[in-house]
Amino acid sequence: MPYSDKVVDHYSNPRNVGSLDKKDPSVGTGIVGAPECGDVMKLQIKVDERGIIEDAKFKTFGCGSAIASSSLATEWLKGKTLDEAQEIKNTQIVEELNLPPVKIHCSVLAEDAIKTALDDYREKKGLPLAERKKH
Amino acid sequence: MSLKFPIYMDYQATTPADPRVVEAMLPYFGEKFGNAASRNHSFGWEAEKAVDTAREQIAAVIGADPREIVFTSGATESDNMALKGVAEMYKSKGKHVVTSAIEHKAIIDSAKRLETWGFDVTYIEPPTDGITTAGMVRERLRDDTILVSIMAANNEVGVLNEVKEIGQLCRERGVLFHTDATQGYGKVPMNVDDMCIDLLSMSAHKIYGPKGIGALYVRRRKPRVRLAALIDGGGHERGMRSGTLNVTGIVGFGKAAELCARELEEETIRLVNLREKFKSIIFESLDEVYVNGHETKRLPGNLNVSFPYVEGESLIMGLKDVAVSSGSACTSASLEPSYVLKAMGRGDELAHSSIRFGLGRFTTEEEIEYVAEKTTEIVKRLREMSPLYEMVKEGVDLSKVEWQHH
């Protein structure tokens, strides 16, 4: 299957690969997917005192589109407030990376990873969780 | 010698026609265009003679009589013909068939069709080494079993089944034995008499012949196997498969068979050496690598490897100048990992992490070194990116993690 140039770019030069200390109270971690399904994403955010995401890291087990979706997500997260981050939609990822229909689940997973990381941070801080729609 | 890209390492999918095969075929596109069934003129006789020669070449590879070769469009048709043809012809004798869960889809789906016809099919699930033994077949035979169909060599993991022992068992029990030898024919020594094979499927394009031509070996004596035809018409191939013979394809198939038989021994040694070299490079540079299927009882040109914590499609994406095949069918809409690896009891995650490297006649040592080193480099890079690899390194037992299934 031909990949879009953007997917190839993120796959070849992934942004923000790595890990943050998940015990750090300013870090939110989201791990979604399952090995037997062929996709696992770990996405982490580090939030400063003003409530702005100052750093984001990911590690992904999955196809090129899954790697690209999570790499793109970390790029988009940096500099956003929690509320702004909450608004990132999988359809925006699909559009930006030009994902074919069989790869839409990769973007869904990335959105889920973002929301899970945000929830984890809010829970640590005792903040109310944002409402989640079910996929 | 310099490398030429892309490198083809998917020889179990198909093979290029050998230039000697192409050369043998050429006259039959042009001046020797006759219909082998034309009995009244020299054009027909010439074509018939060419078909007879090919039939001999193809039969000789498996120690068969040329009259026992029935030409088809390929192994898928041969498999369909064997299962459905036997079922239809012998249904009054019994309605039970034994096969395995890791057969090619041409067998599995034909068997499923038989189930809709009221047959009972038993699917053997081989253990992790992938080998189906005579013992496994014996346990499943019943008084009403009419056919056992077990492949000679598996297309994904390359393992060689106990064909001879299964054949002998079936002969003793008076059950017909079919083997799908699409991958084994011309690659490993086979003899229909020694191995007590009653029906055997072959395909030309897996042995450096053209696509679109195959054959089914159908035993004529002790026992004489009878088949109901799938395709009716002019009564070609002793009524078993009607349709004007693909003379050009048949000539190519014959030549390909002859070359395989002649070079089998030498080629086996060469390929096993290349395969072992490949294996040693990746095993020396990577931790946790698994060969799927038995280590040595396998096709000389097949190596199916799981690279845990790395997803197969992402690995293939990195190997962009190499043509290999993944055990993960993530590219299809189903998102299902290989049913072969699953049936062998490899966990789904290992199935998602597997790659089939298929070596063949035109594979060189330089290609082996390049692909093995490139694979190692990409696996290392992807593992650095893999949350699973990180968790395992931290001492997490992945099987105990509660994953969020989608």
Image (cartoon, helix red, strand yellow):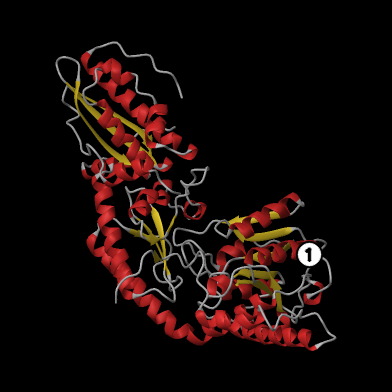
Asked if residue B67 lies left or right of residue A111, the reply is: right
Which residue is at 68% across, 64% downward? Answer: B77
Picture coordinates of residue A13, whole percent (x, y) = 25, 44
Residue B84 appears in view: yes
Chain for disc number 1: B
Furthest-top residue in view? A128
Which residue occupies the foreground of this view, B188 or B5?
A: B5
Circle 1 Cα neighbour tier, 10 Å, few/some/many (<14 / 14–19 / ≥20): some
Picture coordinates of residue B71, whole percent (x, y) = 70, 74
Residue B65 appears in view: no
Asked if residue B118 lies left or right of residue B205, the reply is: right
Asked if residue B307 lies left or right of residue B380, the reply is: right
Which residue occupies the foreground of this view, B133 or A47?
A: A47
Location of residue B96 (image quadrant):
bottom right
Q: Give the labeled residue for mark 1.
A: B231
Q: Is residue A18 above or below residue B263?
A: above
Which residue is at 74% across, 61% downward? Answer: B84
